[in-house]
Image (tube, rainbow, N blue to C red):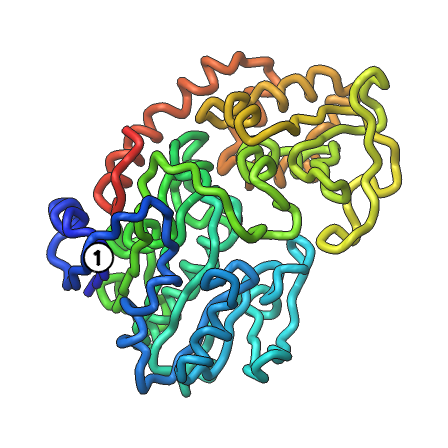
């Protein structure tokens, strides 16, 4: 059963019309226009945790104003048995892809179990002393940003071991558009578990409702179905999909500001090429380049630093592009679309085109969710035709997406 603790009465009618019956609790409308992440609405979810043994899936973004969720709940007398941590670790400092070890939170002494190391989801032992799981992670609304994959694995464990899952929703800073290729069959990976586009325009709470409603999650061991997931979503206050929400905490070491967050859907594709994507600089995903590109372009040198201990092309002088600027300038560059022009320009200028895509193109294809985009870039296809190839599957996804929205859409 889905339970959505609604903030505004209008949400009830909108959601029930698309999703079927759900238990809801109405709360008074909030007149203040400030966006309120669900974690700050403690009155809506504390009753669900009282006298329960709680596991919290969290990282450095799990803040209640300026206090961490774990500290907040502990001070309020909630019995937190353990913390589950995703990619980058509980404190958000590990490199992308770096395996994270189990540890203990120094502030509270609570065990921290990594779900980005030896295993990706909790087992029976991990959940034996847990009554309910709380998920609170700041997502950025991009398919290959791995927190939605971690959510899916966590939901499967919740189904398998009969544990209620409560999601404290957070605004999506890229939730104001939908774009990019939809992942195709045969390209499932932790960078793309489901057939969704690169930019899917949903909060993580809405995404969870879609995983359940479309029966995209399952438990292979006990043969249960998505219907067995006891899911509660606590919505944000004063948020819509037209909102331009600026993150108060960086969601990962290499997304240090909103410029990187806005550019990430387009420039993360450089991870699948010979070019530096700006890791090891103060502007990751805003800069990209390579030593063999023309020296008339912007120069930069990636170096080893926290969150990018061994960046691509470390200590090598690179030439390329710097897309940085004000938030407004970058939003105008993106124009509510996943941009292909920078990738196409880099490929056209790169001297060794046979080696432009690394690992025989497999890394790039995992990001794209297909092999078509790489082929189109190699063949010099124009952006209009590439976008046209995305449209049929994008249109299908948009119909599915609409059924699970908790907030007013941008269209």
Residue at 68% over, 60% down? 94
Residue plotted at (16% across, 45% down): 14
Give the percent coordinates (x, y) of residue 279.
Answer: 72, 42
Q: Give the residue displayed 14% in from the left and 63% down from the top.
A: 23
Quadrant of the snapshot with the N terminus: bottom left
Query: Relative to residue 204, is residue 293 depicted above or below?
Result: above
309, above or below 136, in the image: above
Q: Is residue 183 visible?
A: no
The answer to whether residue 393 is left or right of residue 358 is left
Q: Residue at x 73, y 22 (%)?
A: 353
Q: Quadrant of the C terminus?
A: top left
* Element type at mark 1: loop
Q: Is residue 305 above or below residue 344?
A: below
Of 259 and 15, nearer the camera is 259
Q: Nearer the viewer, residue 36 or 171?
A: 36
Q: Is residue 262 above or below residue 151?
A: above
Counting from the top left corner in percent of width and height, residue 10 is at 15, 47
How packed is label 1: few (under 14 Cα within 10 Å), some, or many (20 or more)? many
**Nearer-the-camera pick, 145 or 331:** 331
Query: Residue lying furthest front in this view?
Result: 32
- Place of residue 286 in the rendered image (x, y in percent of width and height, measured from the top left): 66, 33
Residue 327, horizontal then vertical, whole percent: 55, 31
Residue 144 in sight in this render: yes
Q: Which residue is mark 1?
A: 6
Q: Total number of numbered labels?
A: 1
- Please name whichever residue, 34 or 347, is drawn nearer the observer in this view of the structure: 34
């Amino acid at each position: 059963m889905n339970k959505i603790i609604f903030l505004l009465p209008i949400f009830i009618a909108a959601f029930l019309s698309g999703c079927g019956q759900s238990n809801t609790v109405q709360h008074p409308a909030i007149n203040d226009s400030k966006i309120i992440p669900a974690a700050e609405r403690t009155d809506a979810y504390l009753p669900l945790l009282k006298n329960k043994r709680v596991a919290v899936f969290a990282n450095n973004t799990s803040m209640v104003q300026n206090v961490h969720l774990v500290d907040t709940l502990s001070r309020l007398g909630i019995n937190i048995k353990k913390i589950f941590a995703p990619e980058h670790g509980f404190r958000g400092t590990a490199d992308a892809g770096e395996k994270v070890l189990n540890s203990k939170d120094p502030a509270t002494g609570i065990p921290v179990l990594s779900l980005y190391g030896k295993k990706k989801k909790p087992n029976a032992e991990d959940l034996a002393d847990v009554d309910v799981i709380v998920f609170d992670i700041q997502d950025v609304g991009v398919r290959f940003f791995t927190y939605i994959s971690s959510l899916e694995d966590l939901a499967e464990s919740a189904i398998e071991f009969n544990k209620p899952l409560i999601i404290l929703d957070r605004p999506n800073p890229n939730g104001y558009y939908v774009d990019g290729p939809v992942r195709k069959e045969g390209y499932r990976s932790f960078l793309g578990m489901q057939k969704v586009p690169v930019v899917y325009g949903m909060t993580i709470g809405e995404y969870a409702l879609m995983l359940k409603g479309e029966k995209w999650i399952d438990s292979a061991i006990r043969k249960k179905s998505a219907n067995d997931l006891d899911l509660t979503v606590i919505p944000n206050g004063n948020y819509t999909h037209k909102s331009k929400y600026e993150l108060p905490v960086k969601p990962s070491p290499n997304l240090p500001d909103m410029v990187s967050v806005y550019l990430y859907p387009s420039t993360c594709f450089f991870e699948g090429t010979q070019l530096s994507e700006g890791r090891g600089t103060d502007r990751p995903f805003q800069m990209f380049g390579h030593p063999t590109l023309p020296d008339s372009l912007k120069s930069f040198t990636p170096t080893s630093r926290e969150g990018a201990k061994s960046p691509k092309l470390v200590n090598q002088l690179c030439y390329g592009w710097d897309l940085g600027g004000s938030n407004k300038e970058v939003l105008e560059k993106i124009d509510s679309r996943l941009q292909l022009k920078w990738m196409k320009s880099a490929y056209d200028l790169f001297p060794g085109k046979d080696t432009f895509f690394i690992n025989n193109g497999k890394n790039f294809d995992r990001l794209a969710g297909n092999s078509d985009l790489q082929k189109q870039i190699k063949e010099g296809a124009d952006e209009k035709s590439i976008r046209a190839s995305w449209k049929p599957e994008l249109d299908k996804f948009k119909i599915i997406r609409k059924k699970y929205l908790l907030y007013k859409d941008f269209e």
